[in-house]
Amino acid sequence: MRIDVVTLFPDMIQDGCRYGIPRIAQEKGLLQLGTWNPRDYSRNKHRNVDDRPYGGGPGMVMQVQPVAEAITAARAEGQGPVIYLSPQGRRLDQTAVRRFAELPHAILLAGRYEGIDERLITRHVDEECSIGDYVLSGGEPAALVWIDAVTRLLPGALGDEESALCDSFMDGLLDYPHYSRPEVVDDLAVPAVLTAGNHAEIARWRLKQSLGRTWRRRPDLLEQIDLNEEQQALLAEYIREQQTMESDGNP
Ligand code: 4HQ
């Protein structure tokens, strides 16, 4: 996959992709990363790329011409959609991440200031994408989130140690609890089922924990999936056990 990012801070993108999976994916040739700085396309002697908003108000707006020319330059690198990172976009979730990971090319547009001139969106943007309902000071951290989530799904990017098949969200559920050595920390022991070596029981326990945690913490996620018979039974078991613990006065 090739990803081109239009940004006033190309080093933020390049540096952010020098770690973890995005780095490995680049080293393996699975990810090609390019950056395009609208400032390089400014025709102003001060290399300005922003101007005051029509109608007044605080802050500045990124101008059409330098951003449009940076996008045009990036377009020559592939056939992918132009995706503007903004809180007005459709929320990025794992379903969208899987869809993006199938693209051979994407152009990410990271805005600064109050954002970009709306006519850039009308004429040059194919899709708006939000990483969550909060306000960043620029689109670059959002672009890094997008790149990280998408890159780790590229075939061959993850070792089998960190396989995407076992992910939280793989089946729309939250992750189960993880433990490593030592077996006891202060007064906290690893759940016995994990040290007993019965792999069917371990899989059953983990699925039950995933279901239970999703039910407790993110009931909205449970509404989006259809539980099979086994999953329904495990969740019922979790809920029953937890009610027992409540009446015991245990946490
Ligand atoms: N911004 N998800 C404002 C975001 C954001 C988000 C990016 C701040 C665009 C102009 N981007 N700039 N949330 O908060 O993607």
Image: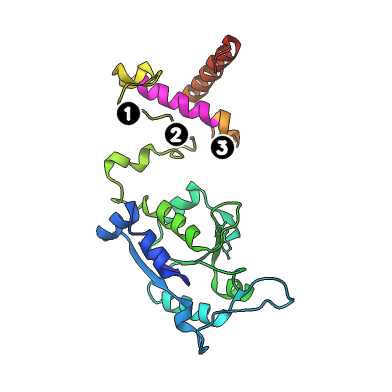
Check the image and name the residue furthest to the top.
248
Is residue 183 rendered magenta in the image?
no
Tell me, yes or no, if residue 105 can be seen here.
no
Separation of residues labelled 1 and 3 (CA atoms): 28 Å
Which quadrant is the N terminus positioned in?
A: bottom left
Tell me, yes or no, if residue 55 can be seen here.
yes
Check the image and name the residue furthest to the right.
55
Q: Name the amino acid type tagged 1.
A: Ser
Name the residue tied to disc 2. Answer: 175
Q: Earlier in the sequence, mark 1 or mark 3?
A: 1
Check the image and report above or below for 19 versus 196.
below
Which quadrant is the C terminus positioned in?
A: top right
- Span of residues in magenta: 201-214
Is residue 207 rendered magenta in the image?
yes
Name the residue tied to disc 3. Answer: 221
Q: Name the amino acid type tagged 2.
A: Asp
Q: Quadrant of residue 114?
A: bottom right
Q: Residue at x 36, y 16 (%)?
A: 192
Separation of residues labelled 2 and 3 (CA atoms): 12 Å
Whether disc 2's CB lies below 8 Å from ligand 1 is answered: no
Q: Quadrant of ligand 1?
A: bottom right
Disc 2 on helix, strand or loop? loop
Position of 24 with respect to 124 (left or right) is left
Q: Position of residue 118 (x, y in %)?
A: 63, 73
Q: Position of residue 138 (x, y in %)?
A: 54, 64
Name the residue tied to disc 1. Answer: 180
